[in-house]
Image (tube, rainbow, N blue to C red):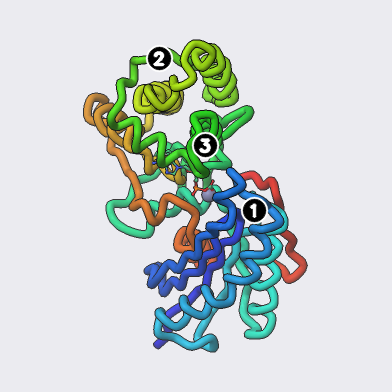
């Protein structure tokens, strides 16, 4: 057949992933999650690079195999250029270059943040342009105005920690293992979100700040634990619900402001924190109340994955946007 097959590789943080896309249709999404970081309470860059080195070729082989094609049928190799951990990115970029070089096919660089948003185009329903996307992950918190697949503008972002980081750091203070975000979500379901009042930081314009909450939780817990050493275990659900309430409030205050400012009622969320049920439920209600069309991708496409990289590569391939063989990864990279 004449199908355009693109192999995409994602290695920006702690997931090693490969995906094959055929004429814009994602055929698979193979992800190897690195469990080695759990016991350290966060991603250890050195260990992440090593695990990518171990996992990458098996993951790529599985993607090609389950796509039912051979290497020689590939039309291009796509990879995450940034943003991300330098050592992790280097593994993916070096492999992608070598593979494209050996097959004598084009190389396509993809911006990871752009790709998180393009995850919305893997399956229906797809948002209509222009739309506003709130991208929330362990590394980023951004409000993006999306005019077209490859035409995006950051209209607001965090000035310090990402919201996922705030979830994980407060979870750590509560004695929960890494990554703590999903656990806060789980315990919050049984708790009262108004039990404790944690700060709602308001930054100028459409920007965010999430570093205040961990400090507030730290001091609050220190005082409470002096009175009652069992304070955390006795009130875990209420603590989780209250922290989650503040974080979700902060996210939604600026999202509402962005919708108002830009007059756009197509609203999407992306990134790992969009799995949070507090965020999903509150946002779903808000969308009904405000008459927004809300788009939430499947969980598999919210966390880091190569299918979203493949989707971005598809649009770049159509425009003939290829990279040269001397391309290097970027730890920081603008959308
Ligand atoms: O997008 P992602 O998989 O990786 C990055 O690019 O960072 O996001 C991971 C982040 C972690 O901080 C994790 O705790 C958070 O997403 N997360 C959640 C939930 N599921 C994942 N945070 C809150 N509630 C969840 N259900
Ligand atoms: Zn990500």
Quadrant showing the N terminus: bottom left
- Residue lying at 22% horizontally and 30% vertically, measured from the top left: 288
Question: For the residue labelled by badge 2, is the local secondary structure a helix, a strand or a loop?
Answer: loop
**Local crowd at mark 2 within 10 Å, few (<14), some, or many (≥20)?**
some
Does residue 98 sit above or below 275 in this rendering? Answer: below
13 or 215, which is in the foreground? 215
Looking at the image, is mark 3 or mark 2 earlier in the sequence? 3
Image side of residue 187 versus residue 46, left or right:
left
In the current view of this chain or complex, which residue is farthest to the left? 288
Q: Which of marks 1 and 2 is in front?
A: 2
Q: Nearer the viewer, residue 334 or 220?
A: 220
How many angstroms separate mark 1 from mark 2 (CA)? 38 Å
- Badge 1 crowding class, 10 Å Cα cut-off, few under 14, some 14 to 19, many 20 or more, is many
Badge 3 marks a residue whose secondary structure is: helix
Residue named by callout 1: 82
Query: Which residue is rendered at x = 50% and y = 65% of the image?
Result: 32
Task: Name the residue beneath numbered marker 2.
Answer: 196
Relative depth, front residue between 310 and 323:
310
Q: Is residue 190 above or below residue 39?
A: above
Which residue corresponds to the image point at 41% horizontal and 72% vertical from the top-left?
Answer: 23
The response on whether ligand 1 sits within 8 Å of label 3 is yes
Rendered location of residue 196, percent (x, y): 40, 14
Q: Residue at x 33, y 45 (%)?
A: 296
Location of the C terminus (image quadrant)? top right
Res. 143 visible in picture: no
């Amino acid at each position: 057949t004449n199908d355009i097959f693109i192999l995409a590789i994602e290695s920006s943080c702690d997931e090693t992933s490969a995906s094959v896309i055929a004429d814009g249709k994602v055929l698979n999404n193979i992800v190897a999650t690195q469990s080695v970081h759990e016991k350290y309470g966060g991603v250890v860059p050195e260990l992440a690079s090593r695990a990518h080195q171990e996992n990458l070729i098996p993951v790529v082989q599985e993607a090609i195999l389950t796509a039912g094609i051979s290497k020689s049928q590939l039309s291009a190799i796509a990879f995450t250029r940034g943003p991300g951990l330098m050592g992790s990115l280097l593994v993916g970029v070096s492999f992608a270059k070598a593979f494209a070089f050996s097959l004598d096919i084009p190389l396509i660089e993809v911006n990871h943040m752009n790709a998180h948003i393009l995850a919305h185009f893997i399956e229906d329903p797809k948002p209509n342009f222009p739309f506003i996307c709130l991208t929330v992950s362990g590394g980023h918190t951004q409000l993006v105005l999306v005019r077209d697949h490859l035409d995006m503008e950051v209209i607001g972002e965090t000035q310090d920690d990402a919201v996922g980081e705030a979830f994980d750091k407060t979870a750590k203070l509560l004695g929960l293992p890494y990554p703590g975000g999903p656990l806060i979500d789980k315990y919050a379901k049984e708790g009262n979100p108004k039990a404790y009042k944690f700060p709602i930081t308001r930054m100028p314009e459409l920007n965010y700040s999430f570093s205040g909450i961990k400090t507030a939780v730290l001091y609050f817990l220190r005082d409470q634990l002096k009175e009652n050493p069992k304070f955390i275990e006795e009130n875990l659900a209420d603590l989780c619900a209250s922290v989650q309430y503040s974080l979700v409030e902060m996210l939604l205050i600026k999202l509402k402001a962005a919708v108002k400012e830009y007059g756009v009622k197509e609203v999407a969320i992306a990134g790992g924190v969009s799995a949070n049920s507090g965020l999903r439920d509150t946002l779903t209600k808000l969308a009904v109340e405000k008459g927004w069309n809300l788009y939430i991708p499947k969980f598999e496409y919210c966390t880091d994955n190569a299918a979203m990289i493949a989707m971005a590569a598809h649009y770049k391939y159509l425009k003939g946007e290829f990279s040269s063989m001397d391309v290097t990864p970027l730890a920081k990279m603008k959308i």
